[in-house]
Amino acid sequence: MLHAVTLALLYALMVEAARLLHAAAAGWAATRRVPLEPLTLIAAAVAAAIGMALGSHAVTAAFGLVPEPAAGTAPAGWLGTAGWASALVLFALALFLHDIHRLGRTWRAMGADAAGLVAIGVPMGLVLPTLLGLAIAGLAGHLAPPPAITDWLPVACLALLVLGLPDRPKGGATLSALFAWLCGALVATLELLLGPHWHSLSIAAVLLVAVRIAAQRTIRYRIG
Amino acid sequence: MRMAPLLTALAPFLLLPALLAGLGHPAAPAFAGYAAGLFLLAVAALLAIGIARLPVFCLGGFAAAGAGLMPLLTLDLEWPTAAALAVTPLLGAGLGGLVRLSIRGLDAVVAAALLLALLLGLASLPAMTTEPGQTGPALDLDGWLLLPLGVTAALLLAARRFADSVIVRLHEAAVLARLPADGIGLELGTLRAVALVLAASIATLGGGVLALGPATMVGIDPADWVALSLALFAIGRLGGGRLGAALLAALPLALLPKLTVALAPQFVDLTLAAALVAIVLQLLVRADGSPAWQPPAPTLGGSLGQSRLGEQRWAE
């Protein structure tokens, strides 16, 4: 059960980090007139997911934080407690800034159309979303359980979806974090209920349906 | 297609297995099968990712489906191994067609997310159809062998005709000049559908070859197939529209990591790490060698072409 809660929180952290870093990257690219093409976004999200998987595996193996890879537990002791406390504080701060504070309006606009903002002379505030995104991603990597593809491949899918959805309404960050939390809980619960093979297949089926529904929403928003 | 660079790139795929066989290494047959399967997968990556520029992350998943089909046909239905191998492209054609229908009209990032989810499901198939510790089906040297050889030759010939077609050349020129393909009258829907179905057929055949036994280099662990799939994505992007470049990219990304494992089984398989390095390098350096953090050089398409490419969809 602890694994389910851990994984669900990690999913929420990773998706929020992806959203913040995407806004910062879009602002940076618009300032420097570098085109941010879809394949670049895709490659960046997938590279981040692979990096998280390999990085957390290397950290857990190097420091012996988890005795057996199948244990599926986060770092224990004061290191884990401090990590979780920092991650939750940063996560709450990021959600507050993103969805309630006036900064969130700029970040949402940067994620949607940074080039348009630059064209009308709006200054890009890149430092805060970059630092917040990197800090949350780093802490999530530190707290991550030993990676299995059924854990990190869905994270990559979620990150891609967050980057792909063009609508950035107020409250969208909280909603996507909640959605990611539920996905993480679902992944971990299915792992408890089913064997490894059926677990992979069921996650793939759920993801396919979820992505297809989200894709329909994307198209509708684009047309509208 | 110029042959000299292609033969140069193909040389390691022939020489390394021959070297292992010459040394009398027990992993030589398995590595030779892996090299042959990887060659087919590199061709599939060339078609779907390099030429059609689709965000296909599930090529390794197609291969896993082919590998998963082999034990079903050979052990459960008791087909000859060669006949089972010849049938695998049919599964790939069906899967490729379904994938094409499912990503039709989607944005690139959403299509990529969908194909990553599909990869997770397909990569689990070999583990579901193969018993733990079961050896792969062996290929006998009899008349049936002509069947998969003929199918392979036909698929490779079709791939070559497709890669050399006028529409593919025009598409490549449009991409290089950053011109919107529909602006110069190119119909990309058919091109992408043909590329995906052909690539999926070749990838399942490659997966079938990888599953040939008695020993195999790629096991039944889904993580192995996912790592191979991500490496193929990097190979397709590095190779662009040239088979020689794709084969050269496959050398450090997929062939050498398995060679080290074949030589010393206790060595860690670095396929996934190599794919990560390649993807990050592609993010940092453009195809023309310029750093990605600087504005791109002006092109024939100009800013109009760039903005149209940025809004590009995979619908047509």
Image (cartoon, rainbow, N blue to C red):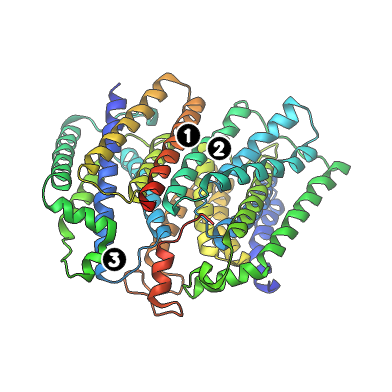
The amino acid beneath tag 1 is Ala
Quarter of the figure with the N terminus of chain B: bottom right
Residue underneath mark 3: A29
Answer above or below: position of A203 versus A157.
above
Asked whether B283 or A170 is in front, the reply is A170
Badge 1, how many Cα within 10 Å: few under 14, some, many 20+?
A: many
User: In the picture, residue B108 is in which quadrant?
Assistant: bottom left
Comparing marks 3 and 2, which lies closer to the viewer? 3
> What is the chain identity of the residue bearing mark 3?
A
Q: Position of residue B119 (x, y in %)?
A: 51, 41
What SS does tag 3 mark? Answer: helix
Q: Are marks 3 and 2 on the same chain?
A: no
Helix, strand or loop status at disc 2: helix
Residue with the mark numbered 1: A204
Residue with the most extreme right position = B143
Numbered disc total: 3
In the rendered image, the vertical position of residue B117 relative to residue B41, given as above or below: above
Sequence-wise, the earlier of marks 1 and 3 is: 3
Q: Which residue is mark 2?
A: B122
At x 60%, y 61%, the residue is B247
Residues at marks 1 and 2, CA–CA distance in whole angstroms: 9 Å
The span from disc 1 to disc 3 (Cα, nearest Å) is 33 Å
Q: Residues within 10 Å of mark 2 (few under 14, many from 20)?
A: many
| Disc 3 packing (10 Å; few <14; some 14–19; many ≥20) | some
Can you give x and y, in whole percent of width and height, for residue A67 in the image?
33, 29
Q: Is residue A37 above or below residue A205?
A: below
Q: Can the viewer see residue A45?
A: yes
Amino acid type shown at disc 2 = Leu
Left or right of A112 on screen, residue B45: right
Tell me if label 1 and label 2 are in contact, CB under 8 Å.
yes
